[in-house]
Image (spheres, rainbow, N blue to C red):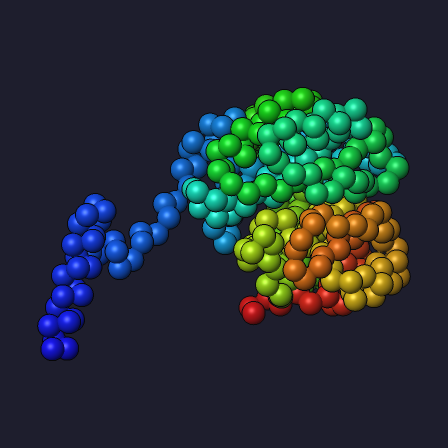
Amino acid sequence: MAHEWRVTLLTRTLALALVIGLSPRVVAQNPPPANIDWKSVDLAMGREGKPQPGGIYKYTFPRGDLRVKVGGTTIDPSLALTGWVAFQGNQFEALAMGDLVLQEQEVTPVLTKLKEMGINPTALHNHLLRESPKIMYLHIEAKGDPTKIAQGVRAALALSGTPPVRPDEPASKKPFPLDTAQIAAALGRSGKINGKVYQVGVPRAEVISLEGMDVSPAMGIATAINFQPTGSGKAVIAGDMVLIPSEVNPVIEALRSAGIEVTALHSHMLSEEPRLLFMHFWGSGEAVDLAKGLGGALQRMNIKRPGS
């Protein structure tokens, strides 16, 4: 009797699968979502993105049209004037996060267009002090079809002076004018040379989640440290420390004791867990001394250690 009942149930299940046009295999397990067609997203964005660690795809928007100075130093776009948007997820629902670099008069038209296109601004503020002309940074977030998000970002940026994509400059054959080995030793980790700037990224040790998704450090939640040479082993530095609230004041103490300025302290997102604060900094002097000061600040943070 039990055997007959099981046979009948199996027969009805197979029949149901055929009625709705599915095979028994599909009834048992749905296929995984397709990968994102990045060529389509590139076309929508009007430029090519680049894969990043953790399955992230990132677009950058250098403001090479601007000549921004802090004191007597003209800032290279790679130091603090490059906007970006990064994507994580799948073709049906991607999470996008980004940071757009804007002049004051560009903020309202760009912000308004983003909202019209379904992209949410999450923060608007300074990153620098005493820069001329004044620059604002608009952080954004969106979730959905990555191609539509890219179309919205492109439409908004068209209302700014952000230049169209340009070919990458050939790598310089000259040695980089800073001792990056000593800088890496002082920081406790190495970085990479991006044009005229030495860049180091430091992810946090915790898992960060946003909109129900674990977010990769490449989505803008890793500490960014940038060195721009100014000659004779000296540099200016800029970037931001990604902190939980209990780390804020210990890191301020470490930076100030090293003569490094705190230029801004604020949020970039609205619903991340745990709560994160971003402390932007600026310094000028001997590059290795600045690296030692930043290394002291990193020691007060819960970050991933090399090899962990």
**Number of numbered callouts drawn:** 0
Residue drawn 43% across and 37% down? Answer: 38
| Quarter that holds the N terminus | bottom left
Vertical placement of 260 versus 166: above or below?
below
Percent x, y of residue 17: 20, 52
| Image quadrant occupied by the C terminus | bottom right
Give the quadrant of residue 252: bottom right
Q: Position of residue 206 (x, y in %)?
A: 62, 65
Q: Is residue 196 visible?
A: no
x%, y% of residue 173?
Answer: 58, 37
Residue occupying image coordinates x 62% and y 66%? 205
In-image side of 249 versus 168 (left or right): right
- Residue 13: x percent and y percent? 20, 59
User: Which residue in the rendered view is the most extreme toward the bottom?
Assistant: 1
Looking at the picture, tell me which residue is in the foreground, 302 or 143.
143
Which image quarter: residue 121?
top right
Task: Classify residue 101 by image quadrant.
Answer: top right
Question: Compared with residue 156, is residue 18 higher up or lower down, i.e. above or below?
Answer: below
Would you say 114 lies left or right of 287 here?
left
Q: Describe residue 238's horizontal placement relative to residue 260 as left or right.
A: left
Residue at the image point whose x is 18% and y is 65% from the top: 9
Residue 305 in sight: yes
Seen from the viewer's position, the closer of residues 217 and 14 is: 14
Give the residue at x 77% y 58%: 294
Residue 266 lies left or right of residue 113; in this view the side is right
Q: Is residue 146 above or below residue 32?
A: above
